[in-house]
Image (cartoon, rainbow, N blue to C red):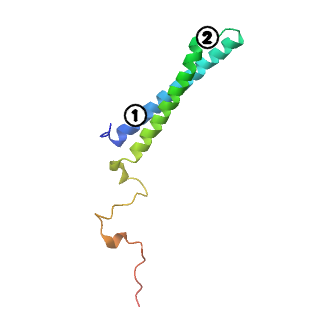
Amino acid sequence: MSDATPSQLLQQSRLAKDQGARFLSAGLGVGAIGALGALAGAVCPVCVVATPALLGAGLVRAAWGKHLERKARAHPRQRFHQPGAQLSTSHSNSATTSTEPPPRAT
């Protein structure tokens, strides 16, 4: 994954975030079924195990998607095109990168 392009990383990020949202939805659904079953007097062992597992997997997957998105935005090939990114001084003319104002004519 270290040689993935920024667009590939963003695509993987979107996929991971989508999967995370699906896992969270499934966890909430199973948890609701388990809660309704508990109100009726029955405890569902699958619901007791699956709910936290799905919620945890969803959170981890969503966090991984955010990590991949940050990695894509910080990718070396992407830095040159980002607004506000500074150019390296080793390849640029030092006269154009100076932050001092030009000398005044007298």
Classify residue 67 as left or right of residue 41. Answer: left
Q: In which quarter of the image is residue 101?
A: bottom left
29 left or right of 7?
Answer: right
Would you identify the image quadrant in which residue 72 lies?
Answer: top left
The numbered dot on residue 44 is 2
Q: Quadrant of the C terminus?
A: bottom left
Q: Quadrant of residue 28?
A: top right
Which quadrant of the rendered structure holds the N terminus?
A: top left
Q: Indicate which disc residue 12 carries.
A: 1
Q: Give, as a three-letter code, the residue at label 2.
A: Cys
Badge 1 amino acid:
Gln
First along the sequence among labels 1 and 2: 1
Rendered view: 101 above or below 8: below
Query: Residue 31, position in %: x, y?
Result: 61, 19
Residue occupying the point 40% across, 87% down: 105
Where is residue 34? Give x, y as percent.
63, 15
Q: Which mark is residue 1?
A: none
